[in-house]
Amino acid sequence: MNDIAGKERMPLEVVDQSIGESKTNQSPDIYYIVLDAYGRSDILSQRFDYDNSHFLATLEDLGFYVAQCGQSNYSGTDLSLPSSLNFNYLEEIIEDFSLENKEQANLAELTKKSAVIGFLEKKGYTTIGFETGFDFTQLYDADIYYTAPRTGINSFESLLLRSSFALVLDDAGFFARYRFTIHESKRNMILSHLERLSEEVPAVPSPKFVFVHLLIPHQPFVFGAKGELSVVSKQTHNDATYYSDEDYIQGYRNQAMYISNKLPEVIQQIFKNSSNPPIIIIQGDHGPSHFSEADRMGILSAYYFPDANVEFYPTITPVNTFRLLFNTYFDEEYSLLEDRSYYSNLDQLEEIPNNCAK
């Protein structure tokens, strides 16, 4: 194993040997692509004056089902992804779960050693993960782990730049020489991951489970609408509250426009370079910030389930994503759960109704 940027921790030759005869070509590859904070189409239109209907129509033309009223189950990544990847609500997974004890709940382990990964590993799947910059979504123990190109900044400096303390130091110009580097670092990471999804990942022998969490359209804002490096604010912080409304709207819209134009190209390359039609799930883990609690819950939710007759529905939430998948392709009999959404409000969870279809 090695930690060279962009190289697999496990050499591909070793992965080939580990697959063995038990991994049949009949099991479809599964791609779970999480676009951080990508909101539902009606929210993008109302709050950002961005019409992404062309993007959604392109996905539908490619064979995707797009849930028009999709919502997240939780309003934050740290709660949303452990729930999605364990296809259940956190209170059902963690005894006496609450926001007050979430730090002790080891949510990162629920993501990295999720029920989805455990299920698929027993079926002979190779797991592929990507560096994200956030420890709780980085699958270090994946069979193949892709890191990002390195820039002239170390991990401590990167962490410091994203901290609240950085705002104080920045007023004195302390971070002037770093700011471009950290924005460039995020941009290069996303571009590298999209390229590997298009070319290298489909070539990995099947079956494989690919989990990629892309920090887009989530801040910091580093992409212009056409993919160019475009920084609308000096902020490098991941907390949306540090951005003015104007900067947030402009930066979020630009990044949403870019990934909406780029991702269909990546999907088509995955199709082209795959030996068998893969399953592809594209979801936001939550919606955008700066607006209402309901806006935070509405997400992009799109499903490509090849050669299957699946009864999708417009209000499906992520807790039912892998229940449907496992029932459809592995003859499991998971019951679908009631679709509920919870907003993290200080020390309690507030249930948010889905009014999209009303």
Image (cartoon, rainbow, N blue to C red):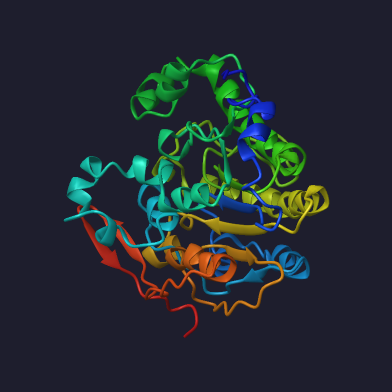
Q: Dividing the picture into quarters, in which one does residue 48 lie?
A: bottom right
Q: Is residue 13 above or below residue 105?
A: above
Tell me if 338 is positioned left or right of 13 in this view.
left
Looking at the rendered structure, the number of numbered marks drawn on it comes to: 0
Q: Is residue 76 visible?
A: no
Furthest residue in direction bottom, as rendered: 358
Residue 92 on image: x %, y %: 27, 62
Q: Is residue 194 above or below residue 295?
A: above
Q: As rendered, which of 312 and 263 lies closer to the eye?
A: 312
Q: Dividing the picture into quarters, in which one does residue 329 lie?
A: bottom right
Furthest residue in direction right, as rendered: 272
Tell me if 179 is positioned left or right of 271 in this view.
left
Q: As rendered, which of 35 and 281 lies closer to the eye?
A: 281
Residue 122 on image: x %, y %: 49, 49
Q: Dividing the picture into quarters, in which one does residue 200 lie?
A: top right
Q: Quadrant of the N terminus?
A: top right
Q: Is residue 186 above or below residue 210?
A: above
Q: Is residue 286 above or below residue 235?
A: below
Q: As rendered, which of 345 and 145 lies closer to the eye?
A: 145
Residue 173 on image: x %, y %: 47, 16
**Which residue is at a point 46% across and 68% down the rendered structure image?**
320
Q: Is residue 326 visible?
A: yes
